[in-house]
Amino acid sequence: MYKTSNNPSEQVPIPHGLLVICVVLAFCLPGLIGHQPWKPDEGYIFAGIFHMLQSGDWIVPHLAGEPFMEKPPLYHWVAAVTATFASPMLPLHDGARLASAVFAAIALWATAMASRMAWGEGHGRISILVMLGTLGLLNTIPLMLPDLPLMAGFSVAMLGFVAHAFNRKWAFFAIGTGVGIGFLAKGLLAPGVIALSAIALPVFFAQWRDRRYARLLLLALLVALPWLTI
């Protein structure tokens, strides 16, 4: 079930991949279906999703007939799609909630990829378990919440920064996509935090002060622009 590195400085127990998958399923699936929308968030989030499905207006979520501009529509879009595909088997609200699993899976995958790239094979599994062990996810994944695509956006952007440190050519695409996902999840929070992180790296670490990094940020901005202008 466990294996260890041959390097004495890296004697970290590596859990078996199947065990990690079972833990992820046990953590994420219970609570996704089989209950009505829970207060306080799920009621108004699902109202916007239901309005999209009924009206065909996929631009602005509505609540009680009024435009609801507090949250961008990315979660609503994905939830409307999952609700439509699951509708023969699940009630609309249960099908919509499957979007939470989609965004949680993206966040876990991106975090695992970044950890494996930075620390070596097997450490992606450890990062998944550490991430699942945070208290903030305990009552978040089984809910309809725009915070989940926000988390996914941060995770994808983080993967991009790690990928750049390891000379991956697609790093700019990951950063720009992470910014876009976060923006369409909860507005300016994700672009602001990621931009501050991008500025902090060359301020505190000399290895990030080069033209290659400036080119990375420019390309990432170009990738993010379609998301930001929607």
Image: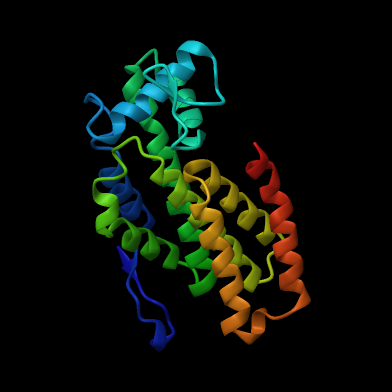
- Left or right of residue 138: residue 177: right
Q: Is residue 65 above or below residue 228?
A: above
Residue 14 or residue 141, whichever sits in front:
141
Q: Is residue 32 visible?
A: yes
Q: Residue at x 47, y 52 (%)?
A: 109
Q: Position of residue 226 (x, y in %)?
A: 69, 42
Hey, which quadrant is residue 173 in on the image? bottom right
Q: Position of residue 210 (x, y in %)?
A: 74, 79
Q: Is residue 137 above or below residue 79?
A: below
Q: Residue at x 32, y 63 (%)?
A: 130
Q: Position of residue 48 (x, y in %)?
A: 41, 24
Residue 76 or residue 196, whichever sits in front:
196
Which image quarter is the N terminus in?
A: bottom left
Q: Position of residue 174 (x, y in %)?
A: 62, 55
Hey, which quadrant is residue 209 in on the image? bottom right
Q: Is residue 162 visible?
A: no
Which image quarter is the C terminus in?
A: top right
> Coloured how?
rainbow
What residue occupies the far front of the structure in this picture? 66
Q: Residue at x 56, y 83 (%)?
A: 204
Q: Is residue 195 above or below residue 21?
A: below
Residue 68 or residue 133, whichever sits in front:
68
Q: Is residue 73 above or below residue 195?
A: above
Q: How many marks?
A: 0
Residue 222 or residue 212, whichever sits in front:
222
